[in-house]
Amino acid sequence: MKRLLAWLLLSLSSLAGYAADRPNVVILLADDQGWGDLSLNGNTNLATPNLDALGRSGARFDRFFVCPVCAPTRAELLTGRYHLRGGVRGVSSGDERLNLDERTLAEAFRAAGYATGAFGKWHNGSQWPYHPNARGFDEYYGFTSGHWAEYFDAHLEHNGEPVRGQGYITDDLTTHALAFIAQNRARPFFCYVPYNVPHSPFTVPEEDWRHFKDQPMPQRGQDGADEDLPVTRCVAAMNVNLDRNVGRVLRRLDELHLAANTIVVYFTDNGPNSYRWNGGMKGRKGSTDEGGVRSPLFVRWPGRIAPGTTLAPIAGAIDLLPTLTSLAGVPLPGSKPLDGRDLSPLLLGQTTEWPDRRIFSHWAGRASVRTQRYRLDTTGGLFDLQADPSQSRNIAADQPAVAAELRQALATWRTETGVGTKAAVRPFTVGYPAFPRSPLPARDGVAHGGAKRSSGAPNSSFFTRWQSTDDSLTWDIAVATAGTYGVAIDYTCPVADAGSTIEVSFNGNKITGTVAPGWDPPFYTNQDTLPRPAQESPAKEFHSLDLGSIRLEKGAGPLTLRALKIPGASVMDVRRVTLTLLPPTP
């Protein structure tokens, strides 16, 4: 026993020494902010002084590329590999989950002795072992879905347990990140802050909105006829709020005397989520054209990265893992081959020579490829982005050899990464003792019969219109541990409809209960600055219905929720079913 204790103390001492001289890392990620949403990049409709200062105080990449949508970019940041290789093929219903055999950036830093924390929109899996606490983060505060319906006093989670946020979500996430930084100021830390703005719904504090609600927007997008000016104004207000929160992070690093030994990274996850000014580039969020995948990238490390550095070589989200581990002297997290390159020689001014490369972009079967000079688009058109930055003139006929080479490269990449192939079936995981609470939100389930989702987009939706015993809700799950599970349902139900008898079943085991009491709150009225788009689910306060416990055996199959008796006009609305593995009884 003494030998074991001595070995543990020696190991911990070695680990602490290994991490002691490492720089801290802070990654700030915006959601649906376009390259053109910063005043540093020429936007005159707003001012982003903190982001502008961050960009000038270190290195700026002129052409940095992410994915057309959210979850894939996050996966590429975490793994240094194209998102398709890691199983991320969508943004909801399980397609956003990062394969369990992928090792993450957070795992690399935690293994090197860093405190690791994430604060915000995760979007790469909700249940253990896909949850951020299972992917290298000691501390997690935020929400795991693609986007959220609540921006004020939001229902969030802290290390898997439900909590209620305070105030505007961007302010709240920043506050928790600042607390993590202060708590770990005496040791190296890796702090990841994936914000969820300016993603819709378009919502911002009144004090930010009043500066923009009547303001002219003289700088318009190239698709002027499609631009919604109130949306442009609200996005500008959301970006100004975000800029202020970035300033809070930078000031806290200064106050704690940590700035000199902290690498700060800022970028966005895709192109703009509406038609607005974006430097004249073609495409927006969801597009594999330049405007859909170009993002700012700022990297600051005082004393190591020269202020005012502008880097011309193309780079991408896949490069961040090898670059940050290299800068920090942290070993790579796994043995799988990376798609990204280590950019540290460029950042540290060790070279000006950089070989040309290809960066591939993909979404929903559409793909394009970018070199330093050209982009081959998803239709096979070739564009010279140096001579034609608006991507307006197809020169494939003028440059047939270049077009043919890039078409072949894109075809090979599509085959290697499985573009167009059917994704493997992956049930939602339940029953891990290390993380006994397994939420099964509506976005991960399927409605049958007349029951429907509250919106077209699964994220942050709930099931509604459940009115018949022929209707049911199912979740395809895999139970990892046989045992007794508590069953709770987040529900609402008109008072007059209370009393339905419901059943939850899985592979022959079942539990029944009664929907009571009635609980029928109105939709929130404090969440939206602009009317909520049709694809966005409304939000309301759900209560928890405790059904009791059920025996679940290890194995896979559908967890089914159905009604046996309906005395009123409907059963209930369902936001989530939660299964909690209970401790064995003595």
Image: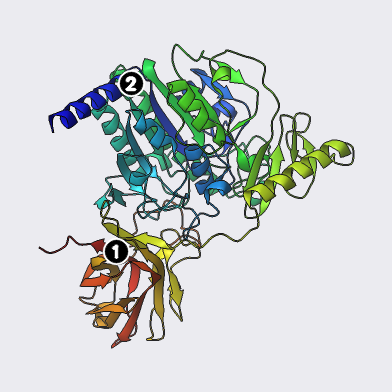
Nearest to the observer: residue 541 or residue 578: 578
Spatial separation of the CA atoms under disc 2 and disc 1: 41 Å
- CA neighbours of label 1 inside 10 A, class few (<14), some (14 to 19), many (20+): some
In the orientation shown, which residue stands out farthest toward the right? 398
Q: Quadrant of the N terminus?
A: top left
- CA neighbours of label 2 inside 10 A, class few (<14), some (14 to 19), many (20+): some
Per the rendering, the mark at residue 18 is 2
User: Residue 475 is drawn in which quadrant?
Assistant: bottom left
Q: Give the structural element (helix, strand or loop) at label 1.
A: strand
Per the rendering, the mark at residue 7 is none
Would you place residue 499 above or below residue 445 in this image?
below
**Picture colour scheme:** rainbow
* Residue type at the position of mark 2: Tyr
Residue 366 position within the rendered picture, expressed as x and y whole percent measured from the top left: 68, 52
Which residue shows up at 28% across the image and 88% down it? 567
Give the side of residue 494 with respect to residue 51, left or right: left
Disc 1 designates what residue? 578
Q: Give the structural element (helix, strand or loop) at label 2.
A: helix
Which residue shows up at 41% across the image and 46% down it? 122
Residue 252 position within the rendered picture, expressed as x and y whole percent measured from the top left: 31, 24
User: Residue 173 is drawn in which quadrant?
Assistant: top left
